[in-house]
Image: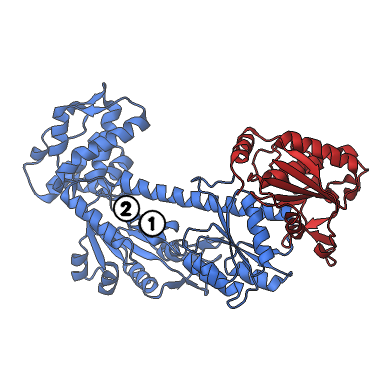
């Protein structure tokens, strides 16, 4: 199975490189970067000054035709879904596409000094989390499981990059199923 | 995954005409492990609604056609237990407050903070779980009353159980007739526990023990300063029973003034506290009990006829124990098991002679006397079996008196009970089912001595 990563207004190549490596390791996927990002203009809401993550997902889906592929958009813009004030990312449950944003994961947004290491950790955790949704995994009650849902950036630091034993078994099981 | 206590996934329906809101919320809830569904308008929501199908419904206040407020009422009429959370596009406090008054659990303003949404759903689930546990506990208590306290398999008692089941769900006034010690209060509680009023209190008024002059205050309460010593406002029994049942025990014993008061509150379902002028409206079901011959009291003019007909709408007569002897051993075993464990004595059965004695005795004090006899026997028993010697029953009960007049029988019985109880007046009065003053009066009347 192949995973495509499409950077969308995301320029930190070091972060992208490390992200690619860990996603390949965790999901046992072949990872490739897609070039030619699409414009986010249409997904922008000037009133909220945010970008609609559901719209981004629909555009990502247009970039992959192969049923056995996954695609992950990585962006630095602030994401939202209409009913929520913000999201760290969004994914198609048991689908192909996911998007994750570094915007609200940055310490400087909360009045703290920059912390590149922490940003890297958080971004990796959220990318694993969203990508696992595309395999059909839902949120987990285990606080340290990567599938635990947190709504504050600092809470993401509580959880690990690993799946708990239950989610791990579920992921293996889901990966063996044919794509829906 | 999020499960309720029955391991059924929590289900959430999102009713919103905006596809993006519907989709993003259902997706959010699905990812959180809930079973989620969506409906674009009131019609679709009502089609998807069945009692018990949805635990929580997120409902947009502004919907095309029937709006969210109206739909909320329709939903509640179909499934009163569902938790409704209103969604509003702007902070319309008036509408939101109105929806809360109509029974909504809470409301959210779009866009909602994800953390707030998570907590809101978690709290709603917690509240539902508590409510469900509360109902289950109350049902358990009800079961205890049904199963644990009224014992009997005789045809006479099976008929009583049938009558309880028939009358309990109605709001009809019930008169329970039966000798002292037959368990009239248990029957009253069983009626209450099997009625729709079971989640409200059953308040007992022992009419035989009312203090003259204070009956009105006992019934209706009083305001501060209503009479000397009334330092604070006090609620009366009828006010406390609001929504539930009033059990008037020994109703045949109330005086003329109390009969008038009682009739008025039964007819109007309202009263004023003593010393007050505020009209208090109450909703109660009336259950009465007596061991007196009310019909005779009517003839003698001691009981108001209009009150009699108000109270005696549905009558249940509990047979005395001597008329249902097949229940005696059943009751003995029940009390033995229950009391031996509470007294912590390893008494497990009865000798055959003891059983025979228990079955042939007339039990004038009925089940109460039987219970006390078993308790005493457990205390004095030396081994694991209760023998005849342990039983506080006269050896020749049928030859207690050569004189078979009622008075002689009563004298002999009172003397017997007093001796069994070591002349403890309180316990003897309890066993006889009369108050202490009456017992003293009878001791004096019959010239009984230690």
When the figure is inspected, residue B88 is found, relative to residue A15, above or below; the finding is below
Residue appearing at x 32%, y 49% in the figure: B146
Give the red chain's letter: A
Visual hue assigned to chain B: blue
When the figure is inspected, residue B243 is found, relative to residue A113, above or below; the finding is below
- Return the x and y of residue B219 as percentages of the image width and height: 42, 64
Per the image, the residue denoted by label 1 is B204
Asked if one can make out residue B319 in the rendered structure from this viewpoint, the answer is no
Mark 2, residues whose alpha carbon is within 10 Å: few (<14), some, or many (≥20)?
some
Per the image, the residue denoted by label 2 is B185
- Return the x and y of residue B371 as percentages of the image width and height: 27, 39
Are discs 1 and 2 less than 8 Å apart at CB? Answer: yes
A19 sits to left or right of B308: right
Residue appearing at x 48%, y 69% in the figure: B77
When asked about the image quadrant of residue A4, the answer is top right
Residue appearing at x 15%, y 42% in the figure: B326
Whether marks 1 and 2 lie on the same chain: yes
């Amino acid at each position: 199975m192949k995973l495509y990563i499409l950077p969308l207004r995301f320029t930190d190549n070091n972060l992208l490189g490390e992200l690619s490596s860990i996603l390949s390791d965790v999901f046992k996927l072949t990872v490739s970067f897609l070039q030619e990002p699409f414009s986010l203009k249409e997904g922008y809401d000037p009133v909220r000054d945010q970008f609609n993550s559901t719209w981004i997902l629909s555009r990502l889906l247009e970039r992959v035709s192969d049923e056995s592929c996954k695609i992950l958009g990585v962006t630095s813009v602030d994401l939202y879904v209409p009913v929520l004030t913000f999201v760290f990312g969004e994914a198609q449950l048991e689908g192909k596409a996911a998007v994750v944003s570094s915007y609200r994961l940055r310490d400087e947004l909360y009045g703290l000094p920059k912390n590149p290491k922490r940003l890297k950790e958080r971004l990796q955790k959220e990318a694993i989390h969203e990508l696992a949704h595309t395999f059909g995994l839902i949120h987990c009650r285990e606080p340290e499981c990567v599938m635990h849902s947190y709504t504050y950036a600092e809470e993401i630091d509580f959880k690990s990059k690993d799946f708990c034993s239950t989610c791990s078994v579920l992921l293996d099981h889901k990966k063996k199923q044919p794509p829906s | 995954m999020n499960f309720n206590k029955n391991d059924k996934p929590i289900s959430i329906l999102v009713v919103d005409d905006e596809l993006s809101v519907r989709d993003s919320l259902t997706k959010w809830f699905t990812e959180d492990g809930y079973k989620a569904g969506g409906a674009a308008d009131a019609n679709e929501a009502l089609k998807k609604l069945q009692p018990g199908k949805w635990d929580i419904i997120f409902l947009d206040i502004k919907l095309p056609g029937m709006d969210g407020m109206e739909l909320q009422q329709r939903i509640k009429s179909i499934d009163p237990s569902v938790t409704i959370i209103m969604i509003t596009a702007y902070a319309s406090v008036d509408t939101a407050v109105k929806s809360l008054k109509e029974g909504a659990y809470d409301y959210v303003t779009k866009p909602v903070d994800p953390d707030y949404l998570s907590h809101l759903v978690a709290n709603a689930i917690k509240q539902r779980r508590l409510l469900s546990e509360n109902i289950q506990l109350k049902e358990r208590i009800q079961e205890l009353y049904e199963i644990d306290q009224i014992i009997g398999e005789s045809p006479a008692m099976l008929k009583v159980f049938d009558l309880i089941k028939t009358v309990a769900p109605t709001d009809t006034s019930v008169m329970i007739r039966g000798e002292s010690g037959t368990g009239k209060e248990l029957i009253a509680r069983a009626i209450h526990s099997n009625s729709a009023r079971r989640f409200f209190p059953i308040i007992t008024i022992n009419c035989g023990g009312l203090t003259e002059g204070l009956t009105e205050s006992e019934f209706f309460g009083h305001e501060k300063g209503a009479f000397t010593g009334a330092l604070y406002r006090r609620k009366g029994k009828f006010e406390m029973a609001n929504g539930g049942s009033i059990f008037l025990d020994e109703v045949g014993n109330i005086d003329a003034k109390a009969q008038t008061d009682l009739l008025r509150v039964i007819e109007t379902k309202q009263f004023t506290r003593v010393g007050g002028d505020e009209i208090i409206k109450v909703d109660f079901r009336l259950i009465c009990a007596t061991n007196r011959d009310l019909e005779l009291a009517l003839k003698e003019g001691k009981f108001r006829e209009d009150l009699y007909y108000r109270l005696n709408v549905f009558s249940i007569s509990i047979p005395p124990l001597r008329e249902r002897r097949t229940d005696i051993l059943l009751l003995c075993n029940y009390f033995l098991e229950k009391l031996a464990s509470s007294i912590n004595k390893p008494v497990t059965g009865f000798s055959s002679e003891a059983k025979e004695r228990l079955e042939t005795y007339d039990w004038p004090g009925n089940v109460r006397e039987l219970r006390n006899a078993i308790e005493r026997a457990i205390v004095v028993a030396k081994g694991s079996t209760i023998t005849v010697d342990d039983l506080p029953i006269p050896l020749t009960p049928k030859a207690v008196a050569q004189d078979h007049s009622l008075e002689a029988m009563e004298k002999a019985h009172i003397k017997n009970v007093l001796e069994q109880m070591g002349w403890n007046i309180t316990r003897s009065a309890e066993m006889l089912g009369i108050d202490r003053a009456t017992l003293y009066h009878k001791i004096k009347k019959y010239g009984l001595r230690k």
